[in-house]
Structures are given as C-alpha cells and as structure tokens.
Image (cartoon, grey):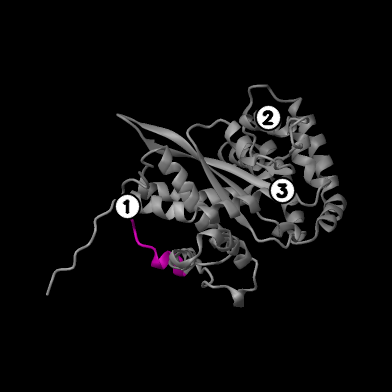
C-alpha cells in the first residue's frame, strides 16, 4: 500500500487563500454596516512582528446593531486594520457614512464630528459607561463620596434606558424625555456646583470635566431614540481580540493584520446572529469551487440574507456559546497570520 502523500503549506498561506476567497462576503458585511443610521466604534492594539522588534498596529471594529431601537436589520460587526492609531483611518473607512457614531472620547475622532464634513455630518454620542467607570473607580478605591453619588445617579439613568430597550425610536425618545431628562438636568447642575468646590488637580474634578466638556454628546440620546447610553456593543466585539492575543501573541505583518480583520468580520457577524461561524464558513467554502465567478456577489449577498431569515430557514446551526467554548481547541502560542 502506498503511503499517502500530503502537500505541506504554511498556515498563513491557507489564511491568505481563505480571506481572498471570502472577500465578497466581507465587502457585503462592510456595506451593510455603513448603511446604518447609528454605529458603534472602538479599537484595540495588536502586536505586529517586525525586523528586530515588535511594533503595534490597531484592529478597529464598527458595529451595526439596531435591535435596541427595534430596527429590523440584522446586526453585523466589520473590522479593519491600521498600522497606527490615527483617527484618519476610521474617517477613511466610514467613507460616505453620515449619522450617529457612538465611541469613546478619543481625540483622533475630532474630524469625524466637524459640522462641515462631507458628504454629511456625523453626530457624536458619548459613552456613559466610560464616564461612570471614572467615578466608580474613585468611589471604590478612594472612597470619594462625591464620585459615589455621581455613579449612583448614572446607574439610575441606565435603569430607565433598560426599560425602553427594543422600543421604536420615537417611543424611546418619549420614554427618555419623560423619565431621564429631569435626572440628567439635576445631574448637570450637581456636577457644575460640586466642580466649583474642587481643586483643578483633584481626581474627581478630572472625572467631572470629562463629562461636562462633552455634555452635548452625552445628552444627545434625549433627543434621538436611536442612541444608546453606552458603546458596549463595540467593546464586546473587541473582547475576542483581547482574549485571542494570549494565544496568537502577534500578527506576522501588516498584511496579516488585514487578514485578521477580514476573519473577525465573518466570525463575529455570524456570532452576533447566533450562527455557528465554523459551520457557516465551511458551508460557503464548500460551495465556492462550483459557484460561477460571475455570480460571486449572489453568494456574498446570501451572508446577510441568511442572518435576516427566520431561524428555521438558516443553513447553519444556531450558535451556542457554551458548546462553542467546549469545542474550541487551545491553540499554541505563535503567529496569527504571516
């Protein structure tokens, strides 16, 4: 019996082949994300292998999730890579998008929110979770009573928003204007009164300034029912990268960073829609060889047609987080991509 011969091929080459073959699906998801009225945006550092040293790139996530305001479109997460942390990369990726962006207070996003931006303005919606963390940390570590009061007031605003989750934008807006507006007004007055009593160098003063200097962005949710209080959807989509870094350590190059972004786009979008990403990718890759090249866009379009279909019409099993964790194998430390 002849021994079975196998062709040796570096893992990075297989990743390259897969991301190239599935690029129409990635483009489809990106277009779907850019078509939203409101987006979540965040980023995280990624070690990049270089000559004689390891550099730092960034993986960015842009999430569309209309479910908090009852939107019918399926959620999706698009990722992209950049070799540095300039906000210009986010501006370039967003392209023609105009609407609301929920993000942290990164100074590099300043140009995104310029009133004269073309093709249209982007409204900034600040993240109350980021603001609350500053006060909660002070209250927990320094036992600062002022910080504790602010954290409690912000918690009350979050409680009100949870009751409006899933309502249509106009209903959410009415709910917030009736129940949250008075709390927000009282909070602003309280912040300004107590800020005047604090030294400029006081940690609590810095936390208060973080809120007051961006007050318009923090209170935009009162007039727009599409806006959430926090950027938690983007933070959740960043978490798999932060966890994954423990296994793959670094990307082998900037090209590897772009490939990682493409794979995260496909995998996390499937998970957002409770679709098993492994089964979904296996199904598409199995069909690709016999799929006409001139109709590749049809296969790409099926990605979001699939996730918006009723569960009994889905081609892949529903994603079960606990089973997924149980099936997942530990990967040895090393490069994610070359």
Q: Quadrant of residue 47?
A: top left
**Disc 1 packing (10 Å; few <14; some 14–19; many ≥20):** few
* Left or right, 127 with reference to 47: right
Which part of the image, by quadrant, shows the C terminus? top left
Per the model, the C-alpha gap separating discs 2 and 3 is 17 Å
Q: Position of residue 9 (x, y in %)?
A: 28, 53
Residue labelled with disc 3: 38
Q: Secondary structure at mark 3?
A: strand
The residue singled out by tag 1 in the image is 11
Toward the viewer: 220 or 133? 220
Q: Residue at x 39, y 63 (%)?
A: 328
Foreground: disc 3 or disc 1: 1
Location of residue 89 in the rendering, given as x and y in whole percent from the top left corner: 57, 35
- Crowding at mark 2 (Cα within 10 Å: few <14, some 14-19, many 20+): some
Q: Which residues are magenta?
A: 323-332
- Mark 1 vs mark 2, CA separation in Å: 39 Å
Question: Please, is residue 201 above or below residue 241 in the view?
Answer: above
Q: Is residue 331 magenta?
A: yes
Q: Which mark is residue 273?
A: none
Callouts 1 and 2 close, C-beta under 8 Å:
no
Q: Residue at x 67, y 47 (%)?
A: 39
Query: Looking at the image, can residue 12 be seen?
Result: yes
- The picture places residue 235, in percent across and down from the top left corner, at 57, 48
Of the residues under marks 2 and 3, which one precedes in the sequence? 3
Where 331 falls versus 312 (above or below)? above
Determine the residue positioned at 54% across, 71% down: 318
Q: To which residue does mark 2 refer? A: 111
In the foreground, 301 or 280: 301
């Amino acid at each position: 019996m002849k021994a079975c011969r196998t062709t040796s091929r570096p893992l990075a080459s297989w990743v390259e082949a897969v991301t190239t073959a599935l690029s129409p699906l990635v483009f489809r998801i990106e277009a779907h994300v850019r078509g939203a009225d409101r987006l979540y945006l965040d980023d995280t550092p990624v070690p990049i292998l270089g000559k004689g040293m390891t550099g730092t790139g960034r993986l960015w996530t842009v999430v569309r999730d209309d479910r908090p305001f009852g939107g019918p479109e399926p959620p999706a997460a698009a990722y992209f890579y950049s070799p540095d942390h300039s906000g210009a990369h986010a501006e370039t990726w967003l392209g023609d998008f105009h609407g609301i962006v929920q993000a942290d207070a990164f100074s590099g996003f300043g140009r995104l929110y310029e009133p004269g931006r073309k093709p249209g303005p982007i409204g900034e919606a600040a993240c109350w979770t980021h603001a609350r963390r500053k006060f909660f940390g002070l209250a927990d570590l320094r036992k600062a009573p002022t910080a504790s009061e602010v954290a409690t007031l912000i918690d009350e605003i979050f409680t009100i928003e949870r009751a409006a989750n899933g309502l249509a934008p106009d209903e959410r807006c009415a709910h917030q204007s009736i129940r949250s507006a008075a709390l927000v007004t009282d909070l602003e007055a309280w912040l300004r009164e107590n800020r005047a009593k604090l030294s400029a160098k006081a940690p609590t003063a810095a936390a208060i300034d973080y809120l007051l200097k961006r007050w318009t962005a923090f209170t935009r949710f009162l007039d727009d029912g599409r806006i959430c209080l926090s950027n938690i959807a983007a933070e959740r989509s960043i978490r798999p990268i932060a966890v994954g870094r423990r296994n793959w350590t670094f990307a082998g190059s900037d090209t590897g960073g772009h490939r990682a972004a493409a794979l995260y786009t496909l995998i996390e979008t499937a998970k957002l829609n409770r679709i098993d990403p492994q089964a979904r990718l296996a199904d598409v890759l199995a069909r690709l060889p016999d799929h006409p090249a001139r109709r590749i866009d049809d296969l790409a379009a099926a990605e979001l047609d699939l996730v918006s279909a009723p569960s009994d019409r889905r081609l892949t099993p529903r994603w079960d987080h606990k089973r997924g964790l149980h099936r997942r194998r530990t990967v040895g430390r090393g490069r994610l991509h070359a």
